[in-house]
Image: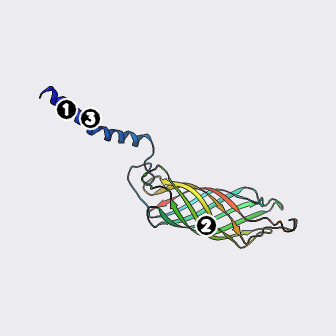
Amino acid sequence: MTTGRIVAALVAFAALGAPSLAHAQNTRAGLPPADQPAIRGIPRPTSFSVEGGAGIVGFLGGVGALGPGWNVRVTGAINDRWAIEGNYLGSTNTRADTRTQLVMTSLDAGVRYNLADADRLPLQPFIVGGIGYAGFAGDYGDNFTLVVPVGVGADRMLTENIKVGARFNYRPAFFDNMGSPITPVNDEPGADTWSLLAQIGGGF
């Protein structure tokens, strides 16, 4: 084989191998896409998931102090970008004026929109919006309010079937009255809340 042919073969080999090498280096540099397990590199897109989580819940109107929150969520994918959700959220907060406990129970249904395809980023960002019910048990609580939760978050597959993520939600409330005997007239505090929760669950 002549020197020219050897050089030509080496150049061709380098040209063919460079993209594969670059791809391998990029893969090792960070997490795989969000629809692939972080622990095992096997694609596992999910159409249905059940998750549980915990975090903190606060009141925007100063009704109560920060308190622990917990949730259960069921999500069903419509396609790669859209999904529907059902949520339960509970919390317990110390009321600011009476120093007694308020226990929230909230149920809502909503729609989730993924801001990017799961196979493009290490985390899949999303926005959510919905409508539901929230009740507050305890001194001067309100047993029925209408809530319209909106939020942002991100999640990914940790293994083939385990999904992890976190989200921030703002939950404005309507038809709410959390006033007590010491509340100034026409200044009843509302039941608007926010939550920051981390979750883990199964994707199928």
Mark 3 and mark 1 in contact? Answer it, CB < 8 Å. no
Is 27 left, or right, of 84 in this rendering? Answer: left
Judge whether 179 appears above or below 22 on screen.
below
Q: Which residue is mark 3?
A: 14
Q: Residue at x 73, y 68 (%)?
A: 136
Gap in angstroms between the C-alphas marked 2 and 1 = 65 Å
The image's mark for residue 88 is 2
Gap in angstroms between the C-alphas marked 3 and 1 = 10 Å
Q: Along the polypeptide, which appears first: circle 2 or circle 1?
A: 1
Q: Residue at x 66, y 59 (%)?
A: 69
Q: Dot 1, crowdedness within 10 Å: few (<14), some or many (≥20)?
A: few
The image's mark for residue 8 is 1
Q: Quadrant of residue 67?
A: bottom right
Q: Amino acid at mark 2?
A: Tyr
Q: Residue at x 76, y 65 (%)?
A: 190
Instruction: Find numbered disc 1 in the image and state the secondary structure of the residue it sits on.
Output: helix
Gap in angstroms between the C-alphas marked 2 and 3 = 56 Å
Percent x, y for residue 149? Answer: 63, 64
Instruction: Find numbered disc 3 in the image and state the secondary structure of the residue it sits on.
Output: helix
Labels 2, 1: front one: 1
Q: Along the polypeptide, which appears first: circle 2 or circle 3?
A: 3
Quarter of the picture holding the C terminus: bottom left
Question: Nearest the camera: 4 or 71?
Answer: 4
Quarter of the picture holding the N terminus: top left
Percent x, y for residue 62? Answer: 77, 58
